[in-house]
Amino acid sequence: MNLSNDITMLIVFTLPPLVVASTAYLLIKKFLQREQNLKLLDIKISNQKDTLPLRLQAYERMALYLERISPNHMLLNQYTHGMTVRDFQRSLITMVRDEFEHNLAMQIYISPALWNIIRNTKEDVVNQINRSAAAINPEAPAHELSEHFFNEVLASENFATQKALAILKSEVAQLF
């Protein structure tokens, strides 16, 4: 009986402190976890305040790039009197690629999906220029390439730059 009393006394004296200690542990753990989540949220909000202007600038630069390689702007800005089709083709392709390389760092601030669309748009424009140039005598005046290229763009319902620009605009709208 003495052993039974000792065990009962041990349980009576140790069980309440164990319950209190485990409850305190769980409460403190939950509190610390909540505090950590709040700090992470504060860091995210702070980062968004810093990165949002950079992201918007990246979207602006990519929109400008897409506008620059759209046929109506590109053909007018790159044309020089006296150029041949071959010269004009080189000039157009060089401009498209140089502008793209100038904006390579912007991929950090935009979604990977949009970056792939912009990269594919660049390739589509270059391929369209090459297809148009292949259909014309390389020594012909440059305006023939311009006419052929523009007519092919008009024949298609939506040129790649316009599609990409629409996707870019919708992605920017999601930021707000």
Image (cartoon, rainbow, N blue to C red):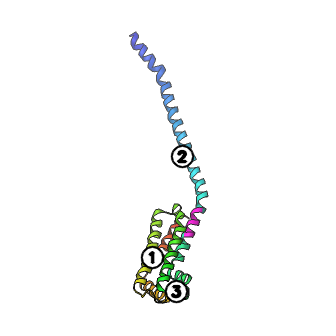
Residue at numbered disc 2: 37
In this view of the protein, can residue 86 be seen by the observer? yes
Q: Nearer the viewer, residue 87 or 31?
A: 87
The residue that disc 3 covers is 83
Residue 103 image position (x, y, % from top left): 54, 67
Q: Nearer the viewer, mark 2 or mark 1?
A: 1
- Tell me residue 12's x, y (percent): 46, 20
Q: Is residue 13 left or right of residue 38?
A: left
Residue 120 in magenta stretch? no
Amino acid type, residue under disc 3 in the picture: Met
- Residue type (three-letter) at the residue carrying disc 2: Asn
Q: Residues within 10 Å of mark 3 (few under 14, many from 20)?
A: some
Residue at 51% across, 28% down: 21
Q: Quadrant of the N terminus?
A: top left
Amino acid carrying label 1: it is Val
Residue at coordinates 45% horizontally, 65% vertically from top-left? 113
Numbered marks: total: 3
The CA distance from mark 3 to mark 1 is 18 Å
Task: Identify the residue shown where x is 42% and y is 80%.
Answer: 130
Give SS at disc 2. helix
Q: Tell me if residue 173 can be seen.
A: no
Residue placed most toward the observer, 19 or 83: 83
2 or 3: tag closer to the N-terminus = 2
Residue stretch rendered in magenta on the structure: 54-61
Secondary element at tag 3: loop
Looking at the image, residue 20 lies above or below residue 123:
above
In this rendered view, identify the residue nearer to me: 21 or 79. Answer: 79
